Amino acid sequence: MSDKDFDCLVFIGRFQPPHRGHLEVIHQALAKAHQVIVLVGSAWQARSLRNPWTFDERSQMIRACFSDEDNARLELVPLLDALYNDDVWVRDVQQKVRELTRATSQKLPNVALIGAQQSQSNYFLTLFPQWQSSSVMPVDGVTSEAIRAPLFKSMESAMAFLDTAADRTLEAPVANAIEAFLSTPAWQALHQEHLLLEAYQSAWRDAPYPPLFVTVNAVVVQSGHVLLVERRSAPGEGLYALPGGFVQNHERLEDACLRELRERVRLKVPLPVLKGSLRAQRLFDEPHRSWRGRTLAQAFYFALRPEQRLPDVRTGQSGHRATWLPLAELDPEQLFEDHFFIIQSFLGLPAGFRADSSPGN
């Protein structure tokens, strides 16, 4: 008889960064199962204050906390989010788990999800009724958000946290990796974004209610290309973004979107043609979608008739350079905020859109 309760346990999380609570779940999983699959969410997304570390960086942090013997039974797999389509995301999880368990078992494996009690994993359980569940007690008072908070305010704040509080929340290899991260250009860019965010929030500090922002975005597609702008300043400097902006008080949403296309990218398409190319619109309201805070985006999908030549675009009032990007070159890691997922929602791009998104990569 096997000395393990399960053939495979699956643990899903973002691990930004991996803390003692996460690692305790993995230790428990290794004790209960022959194989442990850790699906690392928010993979291939641009760095942000909510997602500071890449999949590779998080994977190295986790593996550094386990022995070679444990690592041999541990699979760390990147998982691209699908913010506005649970079915696409669930299919991607199912496919990754099936491929990995098929490689290690000749019979139907006994698979279960594992997570800390009263965590987001409880929501995951409702999406995978075919799998059993296993839970462990959470480590009190340990959250990734509380760890991230002091790390980007200033170098002094980050070092003070690592000197005084890290031992309670982080294993030594993770704390060492974070300390090394403080000397990188990536940390400096995120620190600048934190300062910008603080200034932005201070402007609304005396508002009687938390602010709610309304924006518009345009998804303009022609001949296998999508229209994007390259951001020239923080946040998201150097990233591609959909054309768009804030709605003015006197505007309807569609009119605001059309204005942004005229002003931001100077799209050389007659207004009647553009209006006639509108195929769909949708509200995107994921609570964490924007660095500003609670921000709703109404996006409009324009499918222009295929032509040999793409319409001319120019740098608009914002100073952001406009470009037509082939759909095959879309990279979630190079898209601002949730703009890849907005495009994905309209065009039906699969969760595993990247060529290197297969398990084990």
Image (cartoon, grey):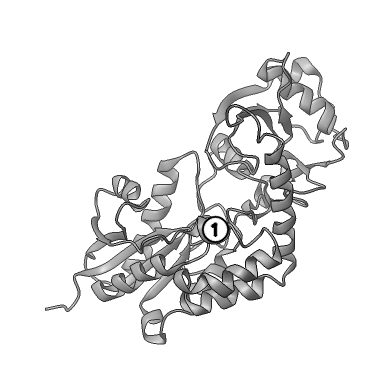
SS at mark 1? loop
Horizontal relation, residue 340 to residue 60: left or right: right
Give residue 57's position: percent from left, percent from top: 58, 70
Residue appearing at x 52%, y 69% in the figure:
165
Horizontal relation, residue 338 to residue 286: left or right: right
Horizontal relation, residue 75 to residue 323: left or right: left
Q: Quadrant of residue 223?
A: top right
For the image shown, how many numbered marks are present on the structure?
1
Residue appearing at x 40%, y 55% in the figure:
93
Give residue 24's position: percent from left, percent from top: 35, 70
Can residue 224 be seen from the camera position used here? no
Screen quadrant of the N terminus: bottom left
Give residue 172's position: percent from left, percent from top: 50, 79
Residue reaching furthest to the left: 1
Residue appearing at x 54%, y 58% in the figure:
43
Residue appearing at x 53%, y 55% in the figure:
42
Give residue 58's position: percent from left, percent from top: 53, 68
Q: Quadrant of residue 138?
A: bottom left
27 is higher (above) or lower (below) than 279: below
Can residue 146 be seen from the camera position used here? yes
Horizontal relation, residue 172 to residue 315: left or right: left
285 is higher (above) or lower (below) than 249: below
Closest to the observer: 164 or 192?
A: 164
Closest to the observer: 145 or 289?
A: 145
The residue carrying pointer 1 sits among few (fewer than 14), some (14 to 19) or many (20 or more) residues within 10 Å by Cα, namely: many
The residue at which mark 1 appears reads as 43
Q: Quadrant of residue 215?
A: top right
Amino acid on which disc 1 is placed:
Ala
